[in-house]
Image: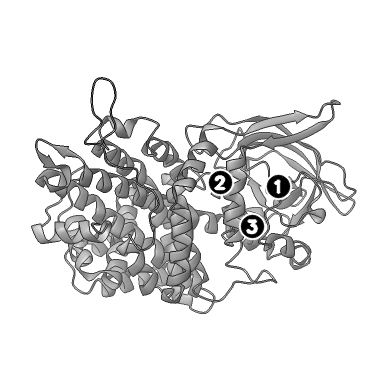
Amino acid sequence: MTPRFDTHDIVNQSPPFENVDLFASDRALLDAVTANGAGGEAAALSDFSRRWGTAAMFEAARAANENTPKLKTFDTKGFRRDEVEFHPAYHAFMRESFRDGLHASTWDAQGRRASAPSEVARAARYYMVAQVENGHMCPITMTRAGVGALAVEPALLEKLIGKIVSRTYDPRFIPWWEKDGITLGMGMTEKQGGTDVRANTTTAIPAADGYAITGHKWFMSAPMCDAFLVLAQAPGGLTCFLMPRFRPDGSVNGLRFQRLKDKLGNRSNASSEVEFAEAFAWRVGEEGRGVRTIIEMVQLTRVDCVISSAGMMRMALAQALHHARHRTVFQKRLADQPMMRTLLADMALEVEGATALMMRLCRSFDLAGSDANEAARARLLTPAVKYWICKTAPGFIYEAMECLGGNGYVEETMLSRLYREAPVNAIWEGSGNVMCLDVLRALSREGEAARAVLADLVRACAGLPGAKEAASFIGRTFMAADGEAKARAAVERLAMLAATAALAEDAPAAAEAFARTRLAAPRGGTFGTADLATGEVAMLLDRALPAA
């Protein structure tokens, strides 16, 4: 029966995009999983995707973001507690992600890297979770990545690893050793320095069994965590520390949360300002080597920024395409109108490139321990891939929002939330300029290995249009005297070349279209301006979301 108000019938509205198989409906993801060695995970990924694609999950995501975290500074007797209170939906997402191991599946019980394709298999799951509720993944990401930094302190890692890899989410505010599972957070930046962490003024003084830390952090991510990796100035210079919420004697540690950040997006997750009042912490790594120690964590969190942004782009595309197939305008379905078809196909092609590139990068992390070339590839491409995909996502999601018209702009659809969420990944763990500087740094430190990576990308493109010219432009720009001033153009080109190479392996038909419209003859400044053939349009739309 057609729904009816007193004055009109409700017709020509697209049904909700829910109760979907997020894996089976995404041909680009299917192909990327197989091409990067995780095809054996297909059945498990399909089960996972059906669970996360339910209407209940989408509704929980709405609730977790509308009911934002609250800081509870004191208890009823006036004692400092500095707890963060969350909506039950947030905790439900944390339980699900813990159960599926998204916080630790890339590590074994001793904190060593799990065997391949653990990074690829986890990335596929993370990509689907980001499509539903991305905010809670902040502590999930940092818990996983924190193990990379703790590896330099084997005794400390051994003490904590059992709690870190536990599949039980335990939100209780009690000492970490009494809990069934723990989460890790991070605090690096201060008011006066931001990205320039060497300007940090927070001090660390050796004390019994550790250090006493006094100072502040302007951004402390996920303040509900059980311990935080932080940077502070020790006698030997800037050093990395692990600061637990409770001191070894069981008393609450000296973390004084000042307030929670009122953020544009990422609303389900808490971010805070904090002061340290002689807070207890363990040293992680040698004094004076704090940046080098914590960069092991940052490298992994950057990968998750990439996965997250690609996942949000995918959901925005699926929402737009689903709506266009059900909405009629001027007596014709939107999805049948030539201009809309070209727009959606161009967007689908962008997601094809982002998905293939993201999964190929994760394969490099899987293989880095045994293959020097893959290790070099991960070091060079991680900042380049983060630059391109994370900066592309906000504009991409806006375009998808416009496909739904006014319906896309209101809170009842999820596109407004995705749009607010997307910028965080381009800012978090290094903004665009920082990513470009990191690419330049990788080139200067290991130029020969970086040049070998570039040559491998060209070979993988196997004569696709514009590949050699792109590589030549990248080389010339980075070698030029004013290379830093022009680095953004070269880094973007590097990421697109790497995406073309990844697509050549995953989806050759899409690779040719991507190379032609992104490398050889770049499209205009907006989506829908690429020169795509009719057959390519049909192929890309079918791959993006097979018609029911």
Label 2, residues with CA under 10 Å away: few <14, some 14-19, many ≥20: many
- Return the residue at label 1: 171
Residue 322 sits above or below residue 7 on the image: below
* Amino acid type, mark 1: Pro
Which badge, 1 or 2, is on the more N-terminal residue?
2
Residue 498 location, quadrant? bottom left
Horizontal side of 528 relative to 388 (left or right) equals left
Q: Are marks 3 and 2 in contact (CB under 8 Å)?
A: no
SS of the residue at dot 3?
helix
Q: What residue did someone put label 2 on?
A: 136
- Give the residue drawn at x 37%, y 70%: 453
Which dot marks residue 146? 3
Q: Earlier in the sequence, mark 1 or mark 3?
A: 3
Q: Residue at x 81, y 31 (%)?
A: 80
Label 2: state its secondary structure. Answer: loop
| Cα distance between the residues tagged 1 and 3 | 18 Å
The image quarter in which residue 99 lies? bottom right
Q: Give the image's coloring scheme.
A: one colour
Number of residue marks: 3
- Real-space Cα distance between discs 3 and 2? 16 Å
Locate residue 212 relative to residue 222 in the image: left or right.
Answer: right
Residue depth check, mark 1 versus mark 3: number of the one nearer the observer: 1
